[in-house]
């Protein structure tokens, strides 16, 4: 696979300090996997892993590599951290940057470490294992290139840690199942589709950030009994221009603005107030919305009375039609409402997953 022209790749690699690889000295992805297979494991128990301390407000950039450990999902290199008992929610975020294995001046293989998060309690007993959900890579700002050694794309894997949830240690690793995969790279200028292979090593940025610093506030606009819009506000992110087809709903009453942490706490009650006839009881709408608001500040997200998500003007119109049908005859609405996700334009996952790259 070639990322653009050889000259383009060479310029990128020189900027990133990978000239040694251009000389043909870089190991291939196959060689990297062989090294992992032959590598001795460092420890027999999770409690024996070498843990670094990661406190709220801290961020670290590292190359994940030897030593290895044999996890439940397979042998993997890892990064392990101890986090303090939290007094307030904090977001643990792992950004895994695409790398390139250059085995000759004309052959390059893009690859990325696909992270899985293992959350442990104070006694190093597993609490939760969180697989990577992203199905496409996010583009990174050019300012991150030199720091991370990446070539423009990354995975973003995040979880909010709550006070009292018992998490005291975090291990970032990958699995046998993840390592055999690959992920599309969205590059409009590319002449052919590109993919990044999943490799055993990679370049990571691991951070623990107080949740209260992620956003400033959330504006709530009541458009009608059928739909409200939520817009997260951040002084650090400029307002996004309207996208083609995006709704410009006119609120039916003055907007309400809540501080971010107040909104986060009140969100379950807010959803209960607007979702009058839920069509998607199996979807964790709260979790998806919070992630959308954090990842897409200043972009209005519509929540419908069905528990669906509205982005375009057509979505808002469909929300109004469904709400009216439900008001006229709830029993008939229940019999006739869409059951097929593929044909349901309001299904929350049809918006949440693409917008988050899940």
Image (cartoon, grey):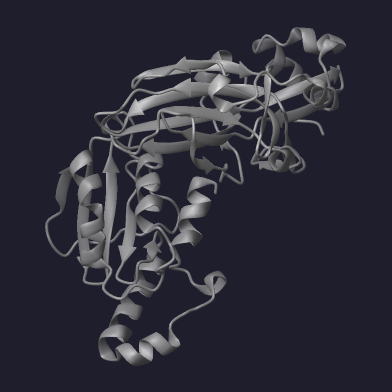
Looking at the rendered image, the quarter that the N terminus falls into is: top right
Q: Is residue 142 visible?
A: no
**Residue found at x 41% / y 40%:** 295
Res 323 visible: yes
The one nearer the camera, 4 or 203, is 203
Residue located at (32% from left, 37% from top): 162
Left or right, 293 with respect to 221, comes to right
- Look at the picture and state if 263 lies above or below 283: above
- Height in image: 99 above or below 335? above
Q: Residue at x 51, y 53 (%)?
A: 353
x then y, percent, for residue 316: 35, 68
Percent x, y of residue 120: 47, 33
Q: Camera-side residue: 32 or 238?
A: 32
Position of residue 174 measured from the top left corner of the image (x, y, whole percent): 65, 34
Residue 74: which quarter of the image?
top right
Relative to 163, 155 lies left or right: right
Task: Report how many numbered discs are placed on residues in the image.
Answer: 0
- Compared with residue 341, is residue 36 higher up or lower down, i.e. above or below? above
At a point 29% along the width and 83% down the height, the residue shown is 324
142 or 108: which is nearer to us? 108
Q: Looking at the picture, how far across and down is residue 251, in whole percent?
A: 20, 61
Whether residue 79 sits left or right of residue 159 in the image: it is right
The quarter of the picture where residue 97 lies is top right
């Amino acid at each position: 696979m070639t990322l653009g022209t050889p000259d383009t790749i060479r310029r990128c690699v020189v900027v990133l300090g990978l000239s040694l690889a251009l000389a043909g000295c870089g190991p291939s992805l196959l060689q990297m996997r062989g090294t992992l297979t032959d590598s001795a494991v460092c420890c027999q128990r999770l409690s024996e892993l070498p843990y670094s301390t990661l406190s709220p407000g801290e961020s670290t950039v590292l190359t994940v590599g030897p030593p290895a450990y044999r996890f439940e999902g397979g042998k993997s290199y890892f990064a392990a951290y101890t986090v303090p008992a939290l007094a307030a929610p904090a977001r643990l975020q792992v950004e895994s940057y695409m790398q390139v294995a250059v085995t000759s001046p004309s052959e390059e293989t893009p690859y990325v470490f696909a992270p899985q998060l293992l959350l442990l309690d104070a006694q190093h007993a597993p609490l939760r294992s969180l697989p990577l959900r992203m199905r496409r890579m996010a583009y990174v700002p050019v300012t991150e290139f030199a720091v991370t050694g990446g070539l423009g794309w990354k995975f973003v894997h995040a979880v909010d840690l709550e006070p009292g949830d018992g998490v005291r240690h975090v291990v970032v690793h990958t699995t046998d199942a993840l390592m055999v995969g690959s992920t599309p790279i969205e590059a409009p200028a590319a002449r052919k589709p590109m993919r990044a292979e999943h490799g055993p090593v990679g370049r990571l940025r691991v951070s623990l950030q107080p949740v209260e610093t992620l956003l400033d506030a959330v504006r709530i606009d009541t458009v009608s009994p059928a739909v409200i819009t939520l817009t997260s506000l951040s002084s650090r992110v400029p307002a996004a221009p309207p996208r083609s087809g995006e709704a410009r709903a006119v609120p039916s009453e003055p907007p309400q603005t809540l501080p971010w942490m107040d909104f986060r706490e009140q969100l379950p009650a807010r959803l209960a107030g607007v979702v009058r006839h839920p069509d998607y009881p199996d979807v964790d709408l709260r979790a998806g919305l919070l992630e959308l608001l954090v990842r897409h500040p200043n972009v209005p997200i519509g929540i419908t009375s069905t528990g669906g998500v509205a982005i375009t003007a057509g979505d808002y119109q469909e929300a109004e039609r469904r709400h009216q049908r439900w008001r006229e005859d709830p029993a008939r609405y229940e019999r006739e409402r869409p059951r097929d996700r593929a044909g349901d334009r309001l299904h929350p996952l049809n918006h949440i997953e693409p917008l988050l790259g899940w």
